Image: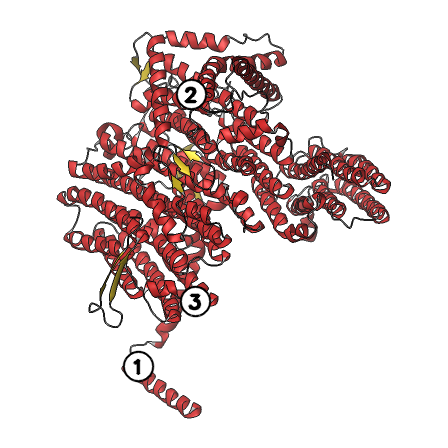
Amino acid sequence: MGGGSWSASVPWLLPLSGVEFAVDGLGGLFMAVGGAVAVAAGVYGIGYARHGLDGRLVQAVAPLFVLAVLLVPAAGDVGTLLLLWELMALTSLLLVLAEHGRRAEVATAGRWYAVMTHLGFAAILTGLLVLASSAGDGSFAALRAEELPPGVAGLGFVLCLVGFGSKAGVLPLHAWLPRAHPEAPSHVSALMSAAMVNLGVYGIVRVGLDLLAGGPRWWWLAVLVLGAGSAVYGILQAAVRTDLKRLLGYSTTENMGLVLVGVGASGLYAAGGDRVLAALALTAALLHVFTHAAFKTLLFLAAGSVVQATGTRDLDALGGLRTAMPATTVAFGLGALAASALPPGPAFVSEWLLLQSLVHGPGTAPGLDVLASIVLPLAVAAVALTAGLAVATFVKAFGVGFLARPRTAEAAAARECPPTMLAGMGVAAAACVAPALAPTLVLPAVTGVAAGVLGAGPAVRGALTTELIGVQGAMSPLLLVAALAVAVAAVVGALRLLAARRPRQARLWDCGGGPMSPRMEYTATSFAEPLQRVFDDVLDPVQDVDVTHHRESRYLVSAVAYRRSVPDRIETGLYAPVLAATAAWGRAGRRLATGSVHRYLGYGFGTLCVLLVLLAVTW
Amino acid sequence: MTVHGIEMLNIAAGALLLTAVLVLWRREITMIVRIFALQGVALAALVAVLAWDEGSAELAVVAAGLLVLRGVVLPWLLRRALTGAAPGQRESRPALNVAASLLAAAALTLLALAVSAPLVALSPAPATRAIPIAIAVVLIGFLVLVTRRHAVSQLVGFLLMDNGITAAGFLSSAGIGLLVEVGVALDLLLVVLVLQVLTGRMRETFGDTDLDELRELHD
Amino acid sequence: MTALGVAGGLLQAVVIVGGAPLLLGLMRQVRARLDGRVGPGVLQPWRDLRKQLRKESITPRGTSEIFRVAPVLMVAMTVVVAVVVPFVTVDSPLPAVADLFVVVALLAHGTVITALAGLDTGTAFGGMGASREVTILALVEPTALVAIFALSVPVGSTGLPAIVGAGVADPDRMISPAGLLAAVALTLVVVAETGRLPVDNPATHLELTMVHEAMVLEYAGPRLALIELGAALRLAVYLGLVATLFVPWAIATSAGVGALALGVVAFAVKVGVLGAALAAAEVFLAKLRLFRVPELLAGSFLLALLAVTTAFVLG
């Protein structure tokens, strides 16, 4: 995957530009990730469809969507990329809308998705056309060869960053993501969240690092800051969500943010002339794309099984699924371990590489000025806070959703999902476990791709131990697992030797108040309450306590109602005014359109006259 | 400058910054005044290190003066402003909560580092390298002045700013003359005395020195 | 994997597992004496463990495997850390695991597993303890990693053997503003992660103030022994980390018997002194309200960040 490239051209397929394909290492990596996700989601989809959960629409459109996702990284010129991008946007929109008959929120989510994805498309279109028109040719090879003027390149990059960033769910263009991903059928959510969003990162890397060959420092500083902001904001929102799939959607924003931190650091180092660290940071980012795809597929598929078994996505209504759905519980647990980036998990390897690339910056990168030396520790702090909050989020999702006792009758009546769905999860789980134990299965390919994009040497080597090249640092997940296994065996052995008596079952300590009911358990809301209070100023939650008094005396309380909602602050603060302005604009326009045919003809006549007068004056 | 001289200078500068942060962190006013006294000592130590390094008697006199004024006299005056009020006075509800103001202080320190980088680049001597810390102290002092409600802690914020400015002056290679320093010191003393009288009056009238109460005068 | 590293790793495992309960006993004894009590003696934690091991293990109804394996996993993870970190010698038996990020994440994983066990019981106490513990964990993480950043930038590596080796070569290096600030920040991290005052009170069983104890309330018998041993191990390992990073004296650089013995004794003395100092400081502290803890952690984060900037500024 690292070395060779392949290209093909189909001139007759599209007028003017033709269709051109060129696959290199970078495109191949994203194709491979997309393909692997598609396999897992496809196997899962068989079981999903057999239970009548999918309409005919999904069956028809899903393959087309997968094809688009696979072909976007293979596009070899601007026109082909845009064509496939639009195909991907339209098919995914149809898939999001698949369950619109069942839930009302689907339509809202679809509307958000349609508008934002097309605004993003417009930005990419403009950006790429600016670059292509300046270069004189739309093929990637020509763009690569051409030295564009800095102003044009900057404009093109910023537009592409906006467009591709909106697809990757980067702040503040993330609003569609946590709405649209949960509303789609779960295997489609997995495809979108694990395969489609990656293409946003692909676009930024392709345009910024490959076609424009790096660029000034401020581009990458912007990417890094956007990434760090998205990571922290995304996981903070996920930490206080109780909707399981929405939580996973926000976690996607978080992980794409982490990837962009890596991409930004890579560009920053490349701009400073340090190819070694640039390659390391890009390797970390691309590896994180891979690991995120693996665990997010697994998590969405497991969440889909939960939804199918219980009919709810609300964590506060779940609980105790481990007895009824052991396989799904193991799958979700594995995904949660990966997502919280704890060792030994796959995401720990990529986050470790990312931290290494940031830590070595101030010491070794020669061209870095004070600004970067301030940014790097802050980036480390942001990654650390993200990792900490991710731990809290996934302890909540797994512990409240799957452990403890069922909180509702639906959760108590859950049954394990059919074998095909489990098989789909199995594929994703294998993709999760393999790189966690032996990163050597994936790392050489990723390292080669990163080195190829930057024209540098590989950043990482080693089979058993992952060793950094050019800077000091080594880590071995396999040795860690082996050491843990030995330690567990030692502890269990010692316990067997020392503790002789048999265990006994007993009831839980209930403070002497009788058997405890599920209503007394901690819920997801209560679990996240301390975090919500700590980040009160950022989250700005809406809380509402209603106390109803007895009719006889106001000193006796008959009921207390507590409501809490945490609206996405960016959504309410940024989008609401824009939407209101658009609506006002629309209302102003309505006054012009009264429905009278004479009036419309009059508009046409008036415009014609004005144009003629203009012509006469300027001739 | 010798290796040990640099070490001493660095530790004094570090203490200057640490005490500024602690003023932001703590709530008890008496503790804040005590920390401020410590900062005065740190500042005097900083100047003393410079004096020892340059072998300048004038600077040594300034260091002694700073120790007396900022380590002893000003804290004593502040403590006097507190006596008579209810014991255990606290900065109970600052305008910006403590956790947020600590994070703001982190941001301000980084800002100080960024703005003073060109200054340091001009003459990268050990003394000039510590200028960002002095500027950070000035900014943190300003933050205290803006966000604290209690009159005495605001006064401490103002004095922090002055400590920072003094430190920056001595650290930059130009230095401040003895005369200027003495003048500034006298001004400062006057300001504190006037404010002390004012707080005394405030307390007699309102029974408290929480400045937010003063808004009612305007309304 | 060198002979020095392997010898050090084995020695450390024995010293820390054997000594951690004694450290806890020492700290309780110091507190007792300062409180004017006689105290139960340094050996009391070992006596407690022996008693718990002889009792029967009680499995509450409705709990799953997570509840049963959590103590074992937590202790195993801490033991791995105790073996790989170069406490006694400058070398590690597994240099590829002895990375500061790995060590900190592994210790955090131990906390996470206990929190899951707390949630698994399905009681209000378990959930409450887990929620609070995980919140503190999430907020500690930035401080810990930025402090690691400050420590590793001058060395150019996050590998513990490299950092400790540099410290042994030049012990005065840590006596600088950056080193001192990082030391204070890391000490606050240790206090928060091991549940000591003022973040958590290890001696309390009051509903409203418990953090760690609420989480493990359902454990009894040998499993409780493991939980308590695990907590003692965590304390010893964290204090050992602080001691090794900031006071890198008398750490064995060769595999001779004398050097190793000196290394073990120095390690025990350093951790003992740190523990006694912590216990003495705790006499004067009250537990913070849970929502004041973020202030403490924000302060420690600021100190860690200042450590980085001063290292950069003052060079």
Residue found at x 71% / y 42%: B151
Residue in front for this viewpoint, A583 or C17: C17
What kind of element bears circle 3? loop
- Label 3: how many Cα within 10 Å (few below 14, some 14–19, many 20+): some
User: Label 2, label 1: how many angstroms apart (C-alpha)?
Assistant: 82 Å
Vertical order, A434 against A223 (above or below) = above
Q: Chain of mark 1?
A: A
Q: Which amino acid is tagged 1?
A: Tyr
What kind of element bears circle 2? helix
**Name of the residue lying farthest toward the left:** A50
Vertical order, A605 against A527 (above or below) = below
What kind of element bears circle 1? helix
Mark carried by residue B105: none
Q: Is residue A125 visible?
A: yes
Mark carried by residue A148: 3
- Label 1: how many Cα within 10 Å (few below 14, some 14–19, many 20+): some
Can you give x and y, in whole percent of width and height, for residue A484 in the image? 36, 24
Can you give x and y, in whole percent of width and height, for residue B159 in the image? 74, 43
Residue in front for this viewpoint, C59 or A344: A344
Q: Which amino acid is tagged 2?
A: Val
Mark carried by residue C79: 2
Q: Chain of mark 3?
A: A
Residue found at x 71% / y 39%: B208
State the residue position of label 1. A600
Horizontally, is A598 left or right of C48 in the view? left
> Closer to the observer: label 3 or label 2?
3
